[in-house]
Amino acid sequence: MSHARAARLGFAITSAWPQVKAKLAEEAALLLHRAQALLFGSFKLTSGLESPYYIDMRLIPSYPDLFERVCDVYCELIKAEVARFDRVAGVPTAGIPFATLVAYKLRKPFIYVRKQLRLHGQLKTVEGVLKPGERVLLLDDLVSTGDSALKTVRAVREAGGIVEDVVVLVDREQGARELLAGEGVRLHALLKVTEAARILHERGLLSREGYEVILSYVEGARVGPRPGG
């Protein structure tokens, strides 16, 4: 985004943002590690595959001060990188607590998307007030391949909303950015998992061997372009 356009939209994007973002990313990596929301070892994923790290941001709301700080970081990222939006939508289910507080802090209406269509009442997928043509910012805790985020993008669009931006704290670097870009959606991530590993390695919290295992795993786990999304 150009500085002139940012000024017209009321957003302050300066040359200092990359440095500010790097500091926020370092803070986030250390916070996740301290809360044991980012662990290294050997973990079995729901897919049945083994992973050398595990991220569980569902733990964060259990620590009110930490939760608020993480949401403040989301707000800084959004103010710096997202031009304009009318509502904030939480990606089910882990993204909903963060989206709720972020929407409140930014004084934006909050909506969320159900994983499954409600089969009673108004039979809605999107809960909350959404008017046709409104711009919706999607917010989640993290992305991997991007499939969950893309499903939410499509649900909001089917309900009449415009979705051009998805914000997450952590990008697991497994193809989400490319998948979403193919649908005309920009991914804004504060932190890549390889960056988190580097930061923790430099702080002496992750061994050199562990760091190299993460780099190798991420490189092998990247998902290439998928026809038709």
Image (spheres, rainbow, N blue to C red):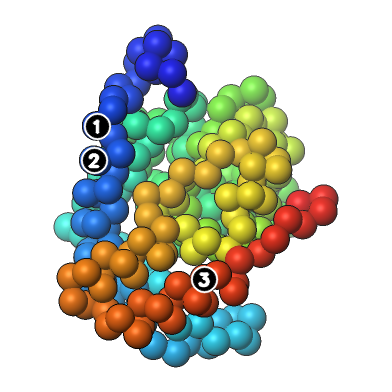
Label placed on residue 218: 3
Are the two marked residues, 1 and 2, in contact with CB atoms closer than 8 angstroms? Answer: yes
Estimate the x, y position of residue 129 in percent, counting from the top left: 55, 33
* Element marked by disc 3: helix
Where is mark 1, residue-wise? 16
Estimate the x, y position of residue 173 in percent, counting from the top left: 52, 61
Closest to the observer: 75 or 106?
75
* Element marked by disc 1: loop
**Amino acid type of the residue that numbered disc 3 sits on in the rendered structure:** Val
Lateral position of residue 48 relative to residue 109, left or right: right
Residue 211 in which image quadrant:
bottom left
Where is mark 2, residue-wise? 20
**Amino acid type of the residue that numbered disc 2 sits on in the rendered structure:** Val
Label located before the other in sequence (1 or 3)? 1
Estimate the x, y position of residue 158 in percent, counting from the top left: 74, 38
Estimate the x, y position of residue 111 in percent, counting from the top left: 51, 41
> Residue at point 66% right, 64% down?
223
200 vs 10: above or below: below
